[in-house]
Image (spheres, rainbow, N blue to C red):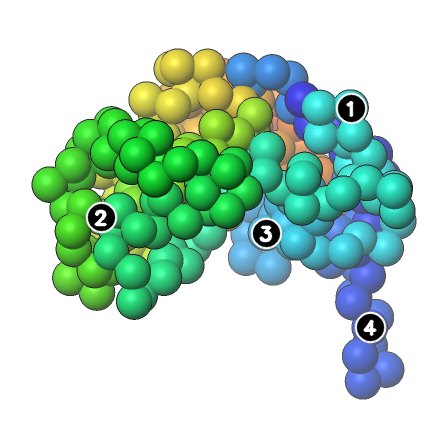
Amino acid sequence: MIRAENVTKIFTGRGVTVRAVDGVSTKVDKGEVVCIIGPSGSGKSTFIRCVNGLEKFTEGHVFIDGVDIADRKTNINKIRAEVGMVFQQFNLFPHKTVLENLTLAQRRVRKRNKKDAQEKARALLLKVGIGEKESEYPSRLSGGQQQRVAIARALAMDPKVMLFDEPTSALDPEMVGEVLDVMKTLAREGMTMMVVTHEMGFAREVADRVLFMDEGKVVEEGTPEHFFIEPREDRTKLFLKQVL
């Protein structure tokens, strides 16, 4: 479903060159959940933004369901409509109600009529546990509720793939669980997911595979059992010692 080949992103400025993503190759099969972990500044978020075409990469290729997003002929907006993205910040429209936030892209991009878009939105709000909040504005919701609205909004587009960029890092600790629970449900239902996260318990429980990144490279990759119990690389062992 996702295939990255030698993806490289180089930032240059003020005479400094940074290889934020340095030759990353990996794939995510249909229905697979892949968690990307690593220290801050390791290139995790930049890489996942490259996968969605939000960050223009310097070298390499990313294929989404067989389509190369680096190809100039590719309609990147059409590809993005198939890829749901959930960010650290919720990126909701503050002047629109929860229901309006969920129906806008459905109507503009998927060309659904108002009734169908609202039906889908309401079903998804129930799914993420906040059906009673459809008439509220984002400012009246907790961080956890706002992030659940953001997940429902992404799901409303019927994406083939969901990408999560540290979706719980901006939340108060007591709100993290409610968002992770929604993500666990999606994983159980077979959604293809790529998740950048600091939540080791989630990665251990839900991931089919874990990627450990450092200094823009994939240092180690494996099943959660291998990764958390018998990592091979010294850098991985040091990181896990610090975070577990």
Which residue, given by chain and number where applicable, does mark 1 sit on? 66
Say which label, 4 or 2, has the lower sequence index. 4
Q: CA distance from mark 1 to mark 4?
A: 31 Å
What's the residue at 36%, 36% (across, down)?
117
Foreground tag (1 vs 4): 1
Crowd tier of the residue under label 2, counting other residues whose Cα lies within 10 Å: few below 14, some 14–19, many 20 or above: many
The amino acid type of the residue labelled 3 equals: Ser
Q: Secondary structure at mark 2?
A: helix
What's the residue at 29%, 60% (across, down)?
96
The amino acid type of the residue labelled 1 equals: Gly
Q: CA distance from mark 4 to mark 2?
A: 38 Å
The image position of residue 222, as x and y in percent, is: 62, 22
Q: Secondary structure at mark 1?
A: loop
Left or right: 218, with 81 as reference point: right
Left or right: 157, with 6 as reference point: left
Q: Nearer the viewer, residue 60 or 117?
A: 117
Q: Quadrant of residue 128?
A: top left
> Looking at the image, can residue 197 be seen?
no
Which residue, given by chain and number where applicable, does mark 2 sit on? 145
Q: CA distance from mark 1 to mark 2?
A: 34 Å
Q: Nearer the viewer, residue 124 or 8?
A: 124
Say which label, 1 or 3, has the lower sequence index. 3
The amino acid type of the residue labelled 4 equals: Thr
The image position of residue 120, as x and y in percent, is: 32, 30
Foreground tag (1 vs 3): 1
Label of residue 12 in the image: 4
Which residue, given by chain and number where applicable, does mark 3 sit on? 45
Q: Residue furthest left?
A: 132
